[in-house]
Amino acid sequence: MEPDYSEELADALVRIQRLVRRRLRGGLTGPRLRGAEVELLRLVEARPGIGISDAARALHLAGNSVSTLVNQLVRDGHLTRETDPADRRAARLLLTETAEKRLEDWRRRRTELIGRQLSRLDEADRAALRAALPALRKLAVTLHEEAEEA
């Protein structure tokens, strides 16, 4: 039987994510966005016009939690809410130009940060990380599928 490295992998992924977030906070202009706010903005970027209930399902959050996030992001100038022509009671969410620029800047800075750190590794480590990407993507898919089933 293969040794269990689940905890070690989970710890490494969490630590990397935490360190990347901390490092990227340093160059921020404007108020800091919380993780859930960034996730919602990235979802709206990927699915412009998404409704609040669909966003809640996609993010695995309660509808009232997403409504609160939407209200904050609208107030802060990151989202706009349009009435859905198919259902006047529903809202469609769209990014503002401010949010688009902020996500673009965040993505650029994250790519530069990770690129710098990858360049500090030897070729064998970079190759190992490159080879692990398909398995990590599959792990993300299975985690997402399990969350959808729950």
Image (cartoon, grey):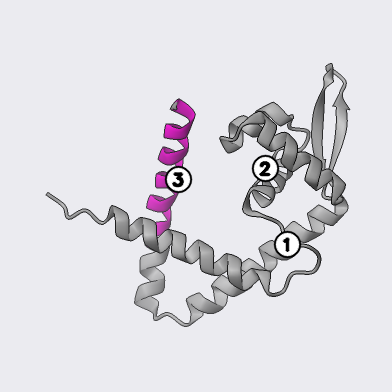
Nearer to us: label 2 or label 1: 1
**Residue type marked 1:** Arg
- How many residues crowd around disc 3 within 10 Å: few (fewer than 14), some, or many (20 or more)? few
The residue depicted at 35 percent of the width and 67 percent of the height is 128
At horizontal 74% and vertical 69% (from top left) the residue drawn is 28
Q: Are there few (<14), some (14-19), or many (20+) residues within 10 Å of tag 1?
A: few
- The CA span between labels 2 and 1 is 18 Å
Mark closest to the chain's N terminus, 2 or 1: 1
Q: Which numbered disc covers residue 43?
A: 2
Callout 2 touching callout 1 (CB < 8 Å): no
Secondary element at image label 2: helix
- The vertical placement of 4 against 122, above or below, is above
Q: Position of residue 136 (x, y in %)?
A: 41, 52
Q: Secondary structure at mark 3?
A: helix
Main secondary structure along the magenta-highlighted residues: helix
Q: Earlier in the sequence, mark 3 or mark 1?
A: 1
Label 1, secondary structure: give it.
loop
Q: Sequence order check: which comes first, mark 2 or mark 3?
A: 2
> In which quarter of the view is residue 89 placed?
top right
Residue depicted at x 61% and y 31%: 62
Q: Which residues are magenta?
A: 131-149
Calculate the distance from the C-alpha at mark 2 to the C-alpha at mark 3.
16 Å
Residue ID for mark 3: 140
Residue 74: x and y in percent read 84, 44
Residue named by callout 1: 32
